[in-house]
Image (cartoon, coloured by chain):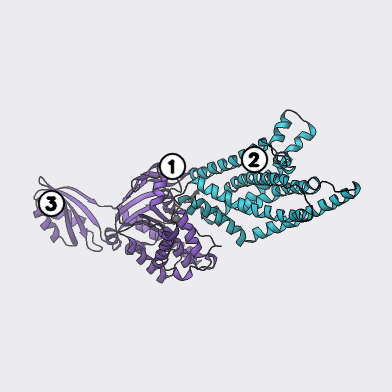
Chain colours: A purple, B cyan
Amino acid sequence: MIKVEGVSKRYARFTAVDNVSFEVEKGQIVGFLGPNGAGKTTTMRMLTCFLPPSEGKASVAGFDVLEQPMEVKKRIGYLPETPPLYPEMEVGEYLQFAGKLKRLSGADLAKRIDEVAQKTNVGDVLKKLIVKLSKGYRQRVGLAQALLHNPEVLILDEPTSGLDPKQILETRQLIKGLAGDHTIILSTHILPEVEQTCERVVIISKGKLVATDTVENLTNRMRGSESIGVEIEGDVAGCREKLEKVDGVKKVVVREDKNGRGYFEIESSEGKNIRADVARAVVQGGFNLTELKAVGMSLEDVFLQLTSTEAKEEKEEAK
Amino acid sequence: MSNILAIAQKEIKSYFVSPIAYALLGIYALICGWFSLIAIANFIEMSQMQQGAADLNGYVIAPVIANAGVLSLFLAPMITMRLFAEEKRMGTIELLITSPITDLEIILGKWLGAMGMYCAMLLIKLLCLSFVFIFGNPDYRPLLTAYLGMFLQGGALLSIGMFVSNTTRNQIVAGTVMFGLSLLMWTFDWATTFKSDGWAKVISYLSLTSHFNSFSRGVLDSKDAIYFISVILLGMFLTARSLESLRWRS
Ligand SMILES: Nc1ncnc2c1ncn2[C@@H]1O[C@H](COP(=O)(O)OP(=O)(O)OP(=O)(O)O)[C@@H](O)[C@H]1O
Ligand SMILES: [Mg+2]
């Protein structure tokens, strides 16, 4: 549904996004994770045709953002980092205006406004001036705007920033409920948010893609376990039995089993370093160990980096 | 089309929910009223000197319109300064640009909105002039020409002002730069006071006032109309280019 291939964005001399590639499948919720200044907003702006990529290709629903921007825009609902609201308008009036920009009109538009107002819980402030809304309501009106034309793809830049814990929960619930019908990318620098809402994660830092992974793998790493990949020559099923008996091994998955060569992915239980034991078990079992490597290794590092920058910021803010 | 109108409507409304519209209309009414007063006084004096009614069109309507044309030069920056600068500062430009509408639709909508505000000012002036029609019996045809002229001149000013507003995110800067440009365009025809051929003629041709003056005298010249329409198109073209380059640069 969304395809990003080797996309870069340069501002004058500064490279904000550097050769990033990832894909999002239809109906998925993907979390776009990275510390401040990582390039999340910039990447989203390129996907929504607000900024053209300096290099590389990006496409949404099969339409290239540079070549067919109109087709892309029709299919995208976008909540920018600061909700694009006109303070002097009433909420209902604003949705009316946004709907017309999205080429809706008449009864159709009225119906859609009703629907999104209900979904995002802004029904009771439709007559209120936007300038008088609290930050949380503004965020919700922004989200309502993004949903108006029922787009296939939703791009949400920090949809929960500035909300209170209850609203955060509600918004996450709402976003989760939208998955399936919609393909969603949401950016955040809060790790638990990704854990709770997203199926997949794309992590960038300093403009570079650091990893893409499923949330499951991610959380495993968070808990301190690790995955290693092992390639052997010999009887694969037999080797698997041996490996499962190694102390600290939680799960063994056979990825490949061909012509007497096997490739396993082994997950350790928490805080155990199993590499040495695994290697020994393979060799002592009479198999040839041809490869042993960590899978997606740098994730842990990224997280250390992420969390440490976050902690630093919080400290600075506290000062 | 409906989204062009939606943008225009939004622009007009945003003038009227802020004090801008009332300040502009108030100043305009005050100054137009003052001009009319002077013109009428002048007319009465002339009538007494000439022992009979002087030409209402020549002594009242033409000077009031001509002065009001200059006034537009000064007020246009206040109409246009916020057009794009404010959208950029508030980030709402992201909504406009990422919506499935073309740049041209955005530009036309904005320009029409500004024209709406400007036409409200022209209406005020019509009110100022209406009593001439109530108490006298001037020829209304020159007035129609003059209004066409004011419409075209305003369109040209607003189009250039829209472009200036698109080059910055600061309204004050947009307003000041446009004000400077207005002054320049006004004074270009002073070139001919020193020299009446060659480059002086070219520069004078670029002056908004020289083209407007014939309109205010009730003379319809297609050359002048073409000049204003070209300026309108130029402003829109420049705005479109700068919207595009906004994307490429930042
Ligand atoms: N218009 C611009 N001109 C120059 N540099 C810019 C511009 N916009 C963003 N940048 C730079 O690009 C980098 C990436 O910015 P971006 O806004 O994409 O980060 P982000 O991941 O969204 O961060 P945050 O979590 O703070 O929202 C930053 O270092 C920023 O300073
Ligand atoms: Mg951001």
According to the picture, the residue beneath numbered tag 3 turns out to be: A283
Q: For the point 46% across and 67% down, which residue is it?
A: A136
According to the picture, the residue beneath numbered tag 2 turns out to be: B228
| For marks 1 and 3 on the same chain, the one whose residue lies earlier in the sequence | 1
For residue A142, side relative to residue B172 (left or right)? left
Q: Is residue A128 above or below residue B182?
A: below
User: Separation of disc 1 and disc 3 at Cα?
Assistant: 50 Å
Total marks placed: 3
Q: Read off the chain for label 2.
A: B
- What's under tag 3, amino acid-wise? Val
According to the picture, the residue beneath numbered tag 1 turns out to be: A54
Query: In what element is the residue under mark 2?
Result: helix
Instruction: Nearest to the eye among marks 3 and 2: give it.
Output: 2
Residue B227 x/y as whole percent: 65, 37
* Crowding at mark 1 (Cα within 10 Å: few <14, some 14-19, many 20+): some
Same chain, marks 1 and 3?
A: yes
Residue B136 x/y as whole percent: 79, 53
For residue B189, side relative to residue A67 (left or right)? right
Q: Is residue A294 above or below residue A196?
A: above
Instruction: Nearest to the eye among marks 1 and 3: give it.
Output: 1
Query: In what element is the residue under mark 3?
Result: helix
Residue A5 x/y as whole percent: 35, 44
Instruction: Nearest to the eye among marks 2 and 1: give it.
Output: 2
